[in-house]
Image (cartoon, rainbow, N blue to C red):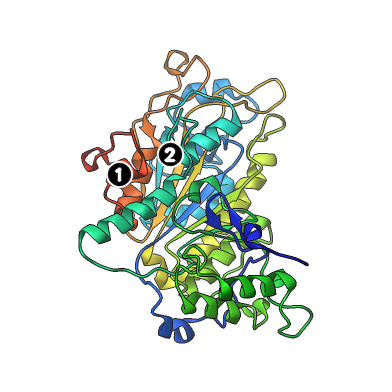
Amino acid sequence: MQMNRRFFLHKGALAIAGTAAIPSFLVRSVMAETEAIRGRRLVVIFQRGAADGLNMVVPYREKNYYSMRPSIAIPQTDVLDLDGFFGLHPSLAALQPLYRQGQLAIVHAAGSPDSTRSHFDAQDYMESGTPGVKSTQDGWLNRALQAEDLRHRCAGTCEQHTAFRALALGADVPRTLAGKIPAIALNNVNGFTIAGKGPTPSPAASAFEAMYADTGDKLLRPAGDETFDAVKMLRAANPAQYTPAAGVNYPGSDFGNSMKQIAQLLKANLGVEAAFTDVSGWDTHQNQGGVNGQLANRLSDFAAGISAFWRDMGDEAGNITLVTMSEFGRTARENGTGGTDHGHANAMFVLGGTVKGGKVYGRWPGLDNDQLNEGRDLVLTTDYRQVLGEVVSQTLGASNLEIVFPGAGLSPNRFLKIV
């Protein structure tokens, strides 16, 4: 198997093919000598396919909600009440305790101000952080890390980062993390580290070692020997050794595995500052279902994965902020096939140790017929960049928001004060 540098480079970032989990041997005691970065960390989850925010966070006091969704609306008797007006879909029951404990906040009627109903364009705009602008080359989260570096330089400080600073769970570095800051895409550690029962490296791992050892390219050596040692340690043991915290059981889905991997990476003290993963299956044009069905199953997995991650992190969760987003919502009315079509505004979740949770944020626009966007969708009242701008400034210290979201005109006095 022949490899070259381009095998690992994707969208301006470093992608390690075939890594998906960090084993438990990479614990603090082992990594302490590498002086891994400590502090707040950001986890971003993208719900690809346009999740139905109106059935995730149900405005159950809106009469028109029920008249527009005769077969898929969530009955008031099944809604998990949040504040007397909104409630969670019953399949999100695993998240309700986090809301009650004040760790989970919800922003409703949020999203991209661009009016496109194209999945491709909407995802591209949200990940680039420049809605309506196709020429943007990098992603908002990569620029947030750039803004963090600029702040430290301006302050006269010098901070070292590892190659694990920015990572994504998947085969490729996503649009969100593309840019000048090196990012790693992790997919399947078993294929990267070992063959059979012994520590024999895979061809991909061997190629990476040779490439890394020989190169002088700063992109491939952002953290020096510490990172290379971590990669060697990673492939030297069985990744199946990792055991979540007592009583924590991740769902066996792809999303559950991704959340488990992020927990492993964060616990390994590899200097992770920003982690990204996505979860698909939200494009419910047909047979969406109500309390039960297609969407309910997706939401159950979604909530279980996030809840397991949060409990697995234990005390370390205090330094983590997790935010969810989707390219747009669904139509307010159900369609003729028991589903919903591409809409506009949606709901975002913000979970964290410093989050002022237990509240649904944002101005609610209403669901009367004359209050709908283009007569069909929930109207957007909170630009998603306003939420993310607050999160990155408070979590990563990216205070120059014009770098992160150029042209958005964000300022702290417009924040929702979630974090």
Residue visible at 64% across and 80% down in the picture: 241
Residue topped by disc 2: 129
Decide: few, some or many residues near mark 1? Use Cα within 10 Å; few <14, some 14-19, many ≥20.
many
> x and y percent of residue 419 in the render?
31, 52
Decide: few, some or many residues near mark 2? Use Cα within 10 Å; few <14, some 14-19, many ≥20.
many
What is the number of the mark on residue 202?
A: none
| Residue 381 vs residue 336, the one in the foreground | 381
| Residue 211 vs residue 116, the one in the foreground | 211
Q: Is residue 327 visible?
A: no
User: From the viewer's perspective, is residue 46 above or below residue 327?
Assistant: below
What is the spatial separation of the Cα atoms under label 1 and label 2, in whole angstroms? 11 Å
Residue visible at 35% across and 50% down in the picture: 391
| Residue 317 vs residue 406, the one in the foreground | 406
The quadrant in which the N terminus is found is: bottom right
| Secondary structure found at label 2 | loop
The part of the image, by quadrant, that contains residue 281 is: top right
User: From the viewer's perspective, is residue 399 above or below residue 361?
Assistant: below
Amino acid type shown at disc 2:
Gly
The answer to whether residue 61 is left or right of residue 413 is right
Amino acid type shown at disc 1:
Leu
Residue topped by disc 1: 401
Answer whether labels 1 and 2 touch (C-beta < 8 Å): no
| Residue 41 vs residue 252, the one in the foreground | 41
| Label located before the other in sequence (1 or 2) | 2
> x and y percent of residue 390 in the render?
31, 47
User: From the viewer's perspective, is residue 310 above or below residue 30?
Assistant: above
Residue visible at 59% across and 27% down in the picture: 118
| Secondary structure found at label 1 | helix
Q: Is residue 273 visible?
A: yes
> x and y percent of residue 79 in the render?
52, 41
> x and y percent of residue 202 in the render?
73, 74
The answer to whether residue 372 is left or right of residue 146 is right
